[in-house]
Amino acid sequence: MILPRKEILYDRYEFKKWEHHDAMTIVETPVSLTVNGEVWISFMCTPIQLEELAVGFLYNEGVIQSMDEVADVRVCEHGDNVDVWLNRSVEQPTNWRRTSGCTGGVTAVDLLAKPNVNFAGNRFRVQPEAIMEMVEKLFESQELYRDTGGVHTSALSDGEKVVLAADDIGRHNTLDKIAGMCLIKNVWPPNRILITTGRISSEMLQKAAQLNAPILISRTSPSSLSIEMAQRYGITLIGYARKHRFNVYSNGERVGL
């Protein structure tokens, strides 16, 4: 099994002198996804929560809707492949597109066309103070980040507490892992807020919509396309969230704007 951390040595030049250091760094490795015996893609990811990553990716891509469709999911002995067996035949998408996701995300979803997604009628509300408290809890939970740096964390909250959290070198992988956790654990909070350390690009917004989360929060910036999509879908999009501040880019009525 591949570990998520790796010991490294490096040299630092500071104040006109060199220092030798030992440290830990985050592991990035290819892990292939095999569906019904056919290799579909390779994730560039951190090798933890791989079953959740595989199942969540298939859910966010619209290939499956529930765990009832999954006959078996298992990580191979060497940790470089996840086998997913469905209880029905399914065709691999032929038009995989590379997204702006770090570590090379791919999707077959048309990010500009989600006609069945509209949260405009969703009445879920949250206070600004609760948003800042959730962001602070997310930062406090980043154990792997404190050990290695260079890793993203995403969390699913019900508006009061963090329900699930996932780490990965790829921000888009964290939302796939969250989806997989929801499916495997059968945990679906009626009110859903997604909080992430990663930049909000179009595929991150699409995954939030697939997870039926009307509020998406990031510690950094949204892209122009993600703002347009959030406005179209009725998602409250929040960026640059910190302990004492945040920016609202769409549908601010959910946070009292």
Image (spheres, helix red, strand yellow):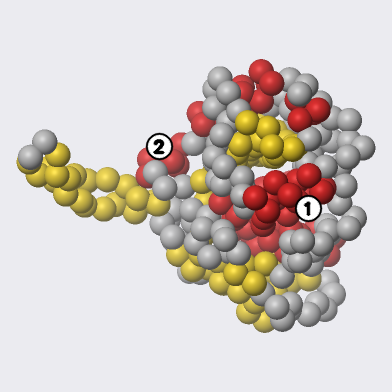
Residue indicated by mark 2: 146
Q: Residue 236: x percent and y percent?
A: 75, 37
Mark 2 vs mark 1: which is more N-terminal? 2
Q: Please provide percent x and percent y for residue 254.
A: 80, 28
Q: Which amino acid type is marked by label 2?
A: Arg
Which type of secondary structure does the marked residue at label 2 adopt? Answer: helix
Q: Which residue is drawn at the image coordinates 86% and 51% (left, top)?
A: 117
Q: Is residue 239 visible?
A: yes
Closest to the observer: 226 or 171? Answer: 226
- What's the residue at 83%, 58% (across, down)? 114
Real-space Cα distance between discs 2 and 1?
Answer: 30 Å
Q: Quadrant of the C terminus?
A: top right
Residue that extends furthest to the right in the rendered view of this protein: 121
Q: Secondary structure at mark 1?
A: helix
Q: Residue 210: which numbered mark, if any? A: 1
Relative depth, front residue between 137 and 31: 137
Quarter of the view holding residue 189: top right
